[in-house]
Amino acid sequence: MNDHVAVPRLSAEGIWKRFGGVVALGGADFDVRPAEVHALLGGNGAGKSTLIKVLTGAHTADSGVLRWEGEPIEIPTRQAASAQGIRVVYQHSTLASHLSVEENIVLGEERTVFGLVDRRDMRTRAVEALARLDVDIDPRASVASLSVGQRKLVEIVRALMGDAQVLVLDEPTASLGTGDSETLFAAVRRLRDLGTSVIFITHHLDEILDLSDRVTVMRDGRTVGTVDTASVDKQELVSMMVGNAVPGRVETLQEPRDTVRLAVRGLASESGLDDISFELREGEILGVYGLIGAGRTELAETLLGVDRQLGGEIVVDGEQVRVRSAAVAAEHGIRLVPEDRERHGVMSVLSVRENLTLPAAKRISRGGWINPRADRAAAEETRGKLSIKTSSVEQPVSQLSGGNQQKTVIGRWFITPARILLLDDPTVGVDVGARYEIHRLVADLAADGASVLLATSDLDELFALSHRIMVLRGKRIAGFLPADPDRRRECLDLAWGA
């Protein structure tokens, strides 16, 4: 790193960004210097992704200032960011697998001769770009034939075509093995030596300490601090992420019964879950915490039958079951409230009433026909109980706020009780008021006997709403904890492997 350079290449000062009533960034600050690897660190929901989207033109900040080499700039679009020299390599591959390496590297920037692509020029430019980072990959090879690590290197080479001065790497090693990761790190160090500014986002503390020059820690949409990596260790970084905030317990949370509703033993799945074992009692809320890729969503999908079970046992009320589909899961009383309510939760073309009562169609039918009076009465009762703010139960659910849509999804399981309820980040994208009401509803469902598996990326929610906590790391169980706010640090240590 060039320590003598005082002026950052790219900086963000006092950045605010709101989505409806949700504050995603609340005055965040960040800067990256020339010839520097700067790590951006924070728990799930800390604001890292939103900040990067502001820096790369995907979002426009509500307020705050962006600067390039000290001068104010605007980055209203991704195209503007690219023209400024800011490029991004995302976690998931964006390469065209049916094309060759060289075709992917120059894609969109091909040169032509008499209207035809100049293949010789393409080869020359691709070879030069690969050599710049000392990447030994045949430019003629099909991308489909490359390893995951090689594809990531090709994406970086492609991003650096042209005058790229700031490169954002978003979780670049999430799907890489050790060998591929080391090759990637060598390329990043080479970039730094060539003068490129690298913003490195990762959940792996070892990578941050090994690779970065400085690290900025974010929490709750704000910048906690920026430190020289050489002056900190894992424990200090975890302390910066945790802070001193202590979540309050949900007042209506009752103690679970002794009866084991769900027992999972040695569960393995097609998505990579390995040796998952736990018990869930009647009326219990078991919090599940883990970083991106730890296996939270995969666990819910395996129990629901969406992800294929490869080994182990799932036992419901003492009976071993094989959940091969969501329909089979429903027969055993297993229901899901998904993270993405717009795509997988509410049916946006239907009314609030229809969304609430559709799973209860058999209960409110006579002779195969739905009883309109019973149908509306069930919807009205649930709307009142859950305080769903709507002008009428006949109002399209798409017109409701995010929090009221989520209450509608949860409301189904008041009408048609779920014995085992899987919650996947149930309050993501909702305001504080709706969040409190949703917590109350989940506690009420548990008090009525539902067994709840709460997979959440929100530490406050995890400790406020759980009876116990199971921490996942690398799609295996890292440990169990009581839901004691004083154990937040230990929870993050398990999740990060600190």
Image: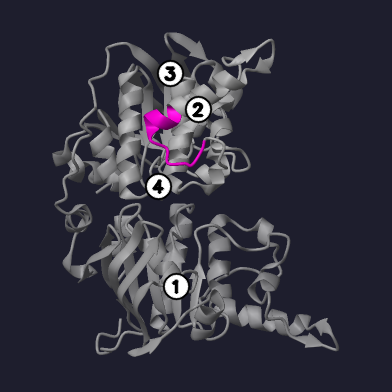
Distance CA(mark 3)–CA(mark 2): 20 Å
- The numbered mark, 3 or 1, whose residue comes first in the sequence reads 1
Distance CA(mark 4)–CA(mark 1): 21 Å
Which residues are the magenta region? 382-392
Q: Residue at x 40, y 64 (%)?
A: 50
Residue 280: image x %, image y %? Answer: 34, 21
Nearer to me, 372 or 53: 372
Nearer to me, 489 or 183: 489
The crowding category of the residue bearing disc 3, from other C-alpha atoms within 10 Å (few below 14, some 14 to 19, many at least 20), is many
Residue 486: image x %, image y %? Answer: 13, 40
Residue 220: image x %, image y %? Answer: 28, 57
- The numbered mark, 2 or 1, whose residue comes first in the sequence reads 1
Please name the amino acid that badge 2 sits on.
Ala
From this view, report whether residue 219 is shown above or below residue 80: above
Q: Residue at x 36, y 56 (%)?
A: 22
In the rendered image, which residue does mark 1 sit on?
60
Q: Secondary structure at mark 2?
A: helix
Please name the amino acid that badge 4 sits on.
Val
- The numbered mark, 3 or 2, whose residue comes first in the sequence reads 2
Q: Nearer the viewer, mark 2 or mark 4?
A: 2
| Residue 330, image quadrant | top right
Distance CA(mark 4)–CA(mark 3): 23 Å
In the rendered image, which residue does mark 4 sit on?
428
In the rendered image, which residue does mark 2 sit on?
379
Please name the amino acid that badge 1 sits on.
Thr
